[in-house]
Each structure stands twice: as structure tokens, then as C-alpha cells.
Image (cartoon, grey):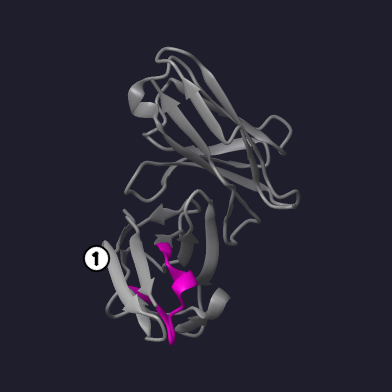
Amino acid sequence: DTGVSQNPRHKITKRGQNVTFRCDPISEHNRLYWYRQTLGQGPEFLTYFQNEAQLEKSRLLSDRFSAERPKGSFSTLEIQRTEQGDSAMYLCASSSQGNEQFFGPGTRLTVL
Amino acid sequence: AQSVAQPEDQVNVAEGNPLTVKCTYSVSGNPYLFWYVQYPNRGLQFLLKYITGDNLVKGSYGFEAEFNKSQTSFHLKKPSALVSDSALYFCAEGSQGNLIFGKGTKLSVKP
């Protein structure tokens, strides 16, 4: 499968713990995006990278959230000191500049 | 600021009938408009896009959408609905790079 992959698919954690998610984009895509989706809502933009540069961050991305794309390929999204309000589906997407975004299956986070 | 509205939470259609899922947008400048579909426990799948050109855009699985600048709308259509089209549909605007999504419309197609 040459689509966008995300790991893990599900993560259950206790409040206050740190979690890290990984996204592997389509190999020739230079842009990578992170979104968050809660039940009954459309995905909300968090941040995006062009190659290894993080070009934009949403105000939704509090200082507990950090994202990296160190070599311009895969990306990680870390949430520190998780809160129950962080429970959501975290979606990754990739694209070639200016074209449609292709989404991965998502990582469902549950914070107990 | 960009925004996208999907005025219907749910659309019910009988199999074989035409379907329309509505979307309106607000953006300064020229819009980049997209439709995605989401099946249960799966990621979003791209259906079609409008960037420029013909106002009627054809996409995957027999879907099409009509861009109407004067009404700031980008409604999704299909001439004959299938039960397998039942899913959650999202309209999105992407002129700034990231996508701004509507809340989604649940399409239910009954046999």
C-alpha cells in the first residue's frame, strides 16, 4: 500500500501521560498536514510542513503539542501531559504542492 | 477568514434517485474547493476538486459537483444513488494551503 500510513491506529492513555503518533506520507509528496477530528465535527487543521519546515501552526496547537518532520519524510506529533479534551481522531494528510490532500486512516486517542 | 457551511446534517435518499449534498463557502479571493467522503473507521477519501475551469467537475464513483460563484456554492451531486454511497461527506476549502472543512453531511441511501 503506497498511501498515507499512521501508527498506532488506537491509543489509550491516562491523563497526564505523553503520547507520540507517527505519520508516513506518500513518498513523493513534499507537504504533510496534521488535523484533529472530534465526533460530529469536520477535521480541524493543526499544522503543516513543506519538506522539513513547519510552515504554519493553528492556534489549536497548544504548547503541549509539538510536531516534527526531521528529514522531510515521516512526521511525529507529540502531546505532552494529555488531558481528556485531547481525546479525538488525529489525521495526517500529504500532498504535492497545490494539489489535493490524501489522508491516512487516523490515530484514535482516548485519554482516561 | 475562510469558512465552509454544510446546512444539512443528514440527507436521506432512495436508491436509484438523484442525490444532492449542499455546501456553501466564504473566502476572500478565488476558492479551492474539495469534496471528501468518510466511511466508518476509515480515513477521508478524495472525491473531486474545483480550482479553476469548468463549473461542473466530475469525480470518483460517479459523483460530480457544480461550482456557482454568484451563490458561493459547491453542491455535490450524483444522478443515481447507491446504497454503498451511504457515508459521511465533507466539503472543504483550501486556498490558503490547509483545508477548512464543513461539519459534514451524513448521506443515507435506502434500498
Mark 1 residue element: loop
Q: Decide which of A110, A98 is in the foreground and name it.
A: A110
**Subunit bearing disc 1:** B
Other-residue count near label 1 (Cα within 10 Å), few / some / many at <14 / 14–19 / ≥20: some
Q: Amino acid at mark 1?
A: Pro
Q: Is residue B30 above or below residue A37?
A: below
Residue ID at (69%, 29%): A70
Residue depicted at x 57% and y 56%: A101
Q: Position of residue A45 (x, y in %)?
A: 44, 44
Q: Name the quadrant containing residue B109.
A: bottom left
Q: Residue at image x 68%, y 41%? A: A51
Region of the chain picked out in magenta, as a range: B73-88
Q: Is residue B87 magenta?
A: yes
Seen as rendered, the residue at the extreme front is B111
Residue B91 in view in this figure = yes
In the rendered image, the quadrant that contains the C terminus of chain B is bottom left
In the displayed structure, would residue A35 be above or below residue B96? above
Of residues A32 and A92, the one nearer the viewer is: A92
Question: Residue at point 47% right, 13% down?
Answer: A17
Does A91 sit left or right of B77 as displayed? right
Q: Could you say where residue A103 lies in the image, as x and y percent from the top left?
A: 57, 51
- Is residue A98 in the magenta section? no
Pinpoint residue A76: horizontal percent, then vertical percent: 61, 30
Name the image quarter holding residue A96. Answer: bottom right
The image shows residue A87 at horizontal and vertical percentages of 39, 30
Res B31 → quadrant:
bottom left
Looking at the image, residue A18 lies above or below residue B54: above
Which residue carries the number 1 mark?
A: B7
